[in-house]
């Protein structure tokens, strides 16, 4: 099997406090369209305080991961996923992939790591908000292997909820 050179040498790892500037650079380098899709509106990049919280401010039961391209002379963040508190045993998932890496399944890899982390930490539900025409994110989240509900929230926005207990509930009901 031939590996696409775009996704060679990419590792996914937990976000570190030392990633703060690299995360700022990653979000600043996204195209306007990608930032618009990720943040549901106009954003020039990540506020430094937000970057600090995403690297250092995770609470109990929250997590973040980066996809990092590793070469002989540098490491570069090319993707980011975060899981932040959104209610009782519910986390909001946010994901972004560098424009040049979109369409190469890197988002799937990040989502799989975040989903596994949430399952291992016995999180009940993941939620997300996306533009209703953001077919890449909607398709990605529907491929979780869990019961996934997409609801029209109006104004061209959808809410997505993924029930991580659906398999346990099905086993209990059987």
Image (spheres, helix red, strand yellow):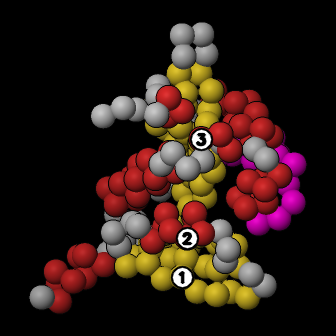
> Does the magenta segment cover residue 33?
no
Label 2, secondary structure: give it. Answer: helix
Residue named by callout 2: 138
Mark 1: few/some/many CA within 10 Å (<14, 14-19, 20+): some
Mark-to-mark CA distance, 1 and 3: 26 Å
> Does the magenta segment cover residue 56?
yes
Of mark 1 and mark 3, the one earlier in the sequence is 3
Mark-to-mark CA distance, 2 and 3: 18 Å
Mark 2: few/some/many CA within 10 Å (<14, 14-19, 20+): some
Per the rendered image, the range of residues in magenta is 40-57
- Residue appearing at x 78%, y 56% in the figure: 33
Residue named by callout 1: 150
Q: Residue 117 location, x and y as percent?
A: 39, 52
Label 1, secondary structure: give it. Answer: strand
Of mark 2 and mark 3, the one earlier in the sequence is 3
Is residue 76 placed above or below 53 in the rendered structure? above
């Amino acid at each position: 099997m031939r590996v696409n050179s775009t996704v060679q040498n990419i590792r996914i790892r937990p976000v570190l406090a030392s990633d703060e500037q690299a995360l700022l650079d990653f979000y600043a380098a996204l195209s306007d369209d990608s930032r618009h899709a990720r943040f549901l509106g106009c954003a020039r990049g990540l506020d430094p305080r937000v970057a600090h919280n995403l690297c250092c401010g995770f609470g109990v039961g929250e997590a973040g991961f980066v996809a990092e391209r590793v070469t002989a002379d540098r490491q570069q963040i090319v993707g980011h996923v975060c899981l932040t508190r959104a209610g009782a045993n519910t986390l909001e998932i946010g994901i972004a992939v560098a424009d040049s890496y979109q369409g190469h399944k890197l988002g799937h890899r990040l989502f799989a790591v975040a989903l596994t982390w949430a399952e291992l930490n016995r999180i009940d539900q993941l939620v997300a908000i996306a533009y209703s025409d953001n077919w890449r994110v909607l398709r990605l989240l529907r491929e979780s292997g869990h019961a996934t509900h997409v609801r029209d929230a109006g104004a061209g926005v959808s809410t997505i909820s993924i029930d991580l207990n659906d398999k346990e509930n099905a086993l209990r009901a059987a």
